[in-house]
């Protein structure tokens, strides 16, 4: 009978683990410094294709979704910071909804929103009125735009610029 693992790790394996952890921590610290200085304002990126089915002008039954998304969509922003969303969208129907809201006021219908209804590139910005935890939401929508659900492809970068 084979016994897997004895519960102890070798010294070289521990050194590799510690080295990888140190590199990861250093990368996070460098990104944090660049982000807060305004040099690298980006928090996330997504490239997605959404196609609804069983859709009417106000609701969808389901959707096909393909692509990738990574980064932070919930973040602590300081009063005066400017949230930035750069997008390149191909809108065949529906609209791309860009929405930023304060977690402390969630459910109160408060926040800034913008609907992208035509294909093309652009940038949308909104200012943070008070320091707090905010969510950046980027999703297809049946509201506005061409009716009958949504069908779109888009790539977006999101982040924030320093308070001025």
Image (cartoon, rainbow, N blue to C red):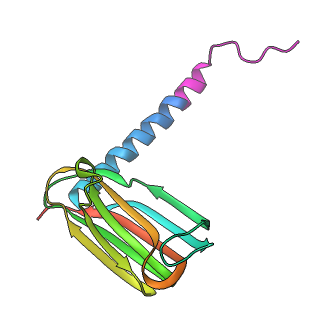
Q: What stretch is highlighted in magenta?
A: 1-16
* Residue 156 coordinates in the image, percent (x, y): 43, 70
Relative to 72, say whether 154 is above or below. below
| 129 with respect to 140 (left or right) | left
Q: At 71% from the left edge and 17% from the top edge, which residue is drawn?
A: 5
Q: Does the magenta stretch include residue 4?
A: yes
In front here: 158 or 98? 98
Main SS category, magenta section: loop
Residue 135 visible in the current orientation: yes
Q: At 30% from the left edge and 75% from the top edge, which residue is drawn?
A: 124
| 95 with respect to 161 (left or right) | right
| 35 with respect to 156 (left or right) | left
Q: At 48% from the left edge and 65% from the top edge, which residue is drawn?
A: 46
| 49 with respect to 138 (left or right) | right
Quarter of image, res 110: bottom left
Q: Quadrant of the N terminus?
A: top right
């Amino acid at each position: 009978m084979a016994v897997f693992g004895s519960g102890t790790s070798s010294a070289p394996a521990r050194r590799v683990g510690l080295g990888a952890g140190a590199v990861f921590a250093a990368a996070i610290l460098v990104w944090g410094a660049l982000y807060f200085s305004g040099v690298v304002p980006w928090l996330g990126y997504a490239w997605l294709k959404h196609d609804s089915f069983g859709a009417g002008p106000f609701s969808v039954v389901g959707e096909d979704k393909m692509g990738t998304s990574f980064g932070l969509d919930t973040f602590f922003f300081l009063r005066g910071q400017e949230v930035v969303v750069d997008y390149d969208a191909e809108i065949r129907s529906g609209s791309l909804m860009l929405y930023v809201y304060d977690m402390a006021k969630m459910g109160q219908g408060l926040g800034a929103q913008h609907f992208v209804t035509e294909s093309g590139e652009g940038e949308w910005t909104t200012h943070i009125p008070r320091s707090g935890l905010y969510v950046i939401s980027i999703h297809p929508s049946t509201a506005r735009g061409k009716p009958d659900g949504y069908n779109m492809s888009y790539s977006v970068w999101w982040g924030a610029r320093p308070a001025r």
